């Protein structure tokens, strides 16, 4: 099937799903949902190429999971698809939504088998119930529920998108409006679309995530700077000096961010928040931590616990430990009993012992989010 390229759309915000974790990042065993779908299609046919359309911020991370081509998504489904179509050179292009995660092999084969019967081959379901449009009943035998994957002639689909200004919700609508021929084949109830959390019960192909735990270590160090406010662990510390840094210099939070990024294999704090970017100048480090925590939950993880070791000759940490724990627990969205703060001195040795700065080491443990607990 070298004449067919496959495009998988996975750039949505999951706004209707109602979970901190985006549906494309719900782990199936040890694969996020988008990867499960890509692998399932790859087993079916020898596609010329498989293109995964994703959020720009997700692409570098997703590329660690498999040898696929990734394309930046747009503001709409059509814009995302248009971005992917730019590089497609095959005669035919198959398009599917990652949200249709249960792949019916027979249905996909029906779509491909009938490719010569139209410009766009579409799987559809017939409607059994009585249908009303506004206040009037309509003939249900005329109604079709459109599904994906849809197979289109690449040239026709590109021309339809280029010449029609309207935003279409699927390929068949665009090709039909362009004057092309749409050919229907029998769809499948297995190809139910994951839209809301209630749909999880309607998708028997979904697998529970593996019981895996991931640990990351973060280390950060900052020298003191006179006449600057000190922030440590998200709170202000009473002192006549702060930390020399591009941001507010919260060495504890910076260390924790690196631990979280290490556990999730997402790089390090310098990659995410470069110190030559002016928008991070003097920024509150709690905002950086909150962003990283949200990213971790969005991508299918949850935080199990965090443990920080603060090595400082000064200031004295013990009066602030309880407040630091409460602050970090709230940002990390975990109970306070899963946050541990340890403080020690350097026994007057080295730069820390000379009271020139502070070092913090953090350990964070994550696990796959169990989507079965979504209520």
Image: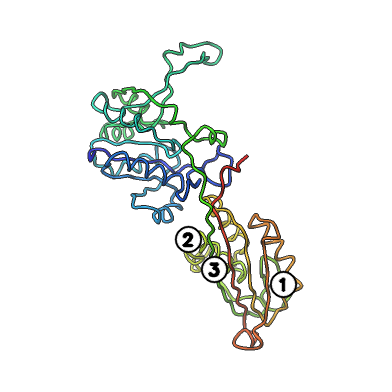
> Upstream in the sequence, badge 1 or badge 2?
1
Count residues near mark 3 (Cα–Cα under 10 Å), then give few for <14, some for 14-19, many for 20+.
many
- Which element is circle 3 on? strand
Q: Residue furthest front?
A: 211
Identified at 31% across, 23% down, the residue is 182
* Quadrant of the frame with the C terminus: top right
The residue tagged 1 is 237
Q: Is residue 25 left or right of residue 349?
A: left
CA distance for labels 1 and 3: 25 Å
The answer to whether residue 242 is above or below residue 354 is: above
Quick one: label 2 or label 3, which is nearer the N terminus?
3
Which residue is drawn at the image coordinates 43% and 17% (left, top)?
143
As drawn, the label of residue 265 is 2
Q: Residues within 10 Å of mark 1 (few under 14, many from 20)?
A: some
Q: Label for residue 217?
A: 3
Say which of 38 and 271 sits in front.
Answer: 38
């Amino acid at each position: 099937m070298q004449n067919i390229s496959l495009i998988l759309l996975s750039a949505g915000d999951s706004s209707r799903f109602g979970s901190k974790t985006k549906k494309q990042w719900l782990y199936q065993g040890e694969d996020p949902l988008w990867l499960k779908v890509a692998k399932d299609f790859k087993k079916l046919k020898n596609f010329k190429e498989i293109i995964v359309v994703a959020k720009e911020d997700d692409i570098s991370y997703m590329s660690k999971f498999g040898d696929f081509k990734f394309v930046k998504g747009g503001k709409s489904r059509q814009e995302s698809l248009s971005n992917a179509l730019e590089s497609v050179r095959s005669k035919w292009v198959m398009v599917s939504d990652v949200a249709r995660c249960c792949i019916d092999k027979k249905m996909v084969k029906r779509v491909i088998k009938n490719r010569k019967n139209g410009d766009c081959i579409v799987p559809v379901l017939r409607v059994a119930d009585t249908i009303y449009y506004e206040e009037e009943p309509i003939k249900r035998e005329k109604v079709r529920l459109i599904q994906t994957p849809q197979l289109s002639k690449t040239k026709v689909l590109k021309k339809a998108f280029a010449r029609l200004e309207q935003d279409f919700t699927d390929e068949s609508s665009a090709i039909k409006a362009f004057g092309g021929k749409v050919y229907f084949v029998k769809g499948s109830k297995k190809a139910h679309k994951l839209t809301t959390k209630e749909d999880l019960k309607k998708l028997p192909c979904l697998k529970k995530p593996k019981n895996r735990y991931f640990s990351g270590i973060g280390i950060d160090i900052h020298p003191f700077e006179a006449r600057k406010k000190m922030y440590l662990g998200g709170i202000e510390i009473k002192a006549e000096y702060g930390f020399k840094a591009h941001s507010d210099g919260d060495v504890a939070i910076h260390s924790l961010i690196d631990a979280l990024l290490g556990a999730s294999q997402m790089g390090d704090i310098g990659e995410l928040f470069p110190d030559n970017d002016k928008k991070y100048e003097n920024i509150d480090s709690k905002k950086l931590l909150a962003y990283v925590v949200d990213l971790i939950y969005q991508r299918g993880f949850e935080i199990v616990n965090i443990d920080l070791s603060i090595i400082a000759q000064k200031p004295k940490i013990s009066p602030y430990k309880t407040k630091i724990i409460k602050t970090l627990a709230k940002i990390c969205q975990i109970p306070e009993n899963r946050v541990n703060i340890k403080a020690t001195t350097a026994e007057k040795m080295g730069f820390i012992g000379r009271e020139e700065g502070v070092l913090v080491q953090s350990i964070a443990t994550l696990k796959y989010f169990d989507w079965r607990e979504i209520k």
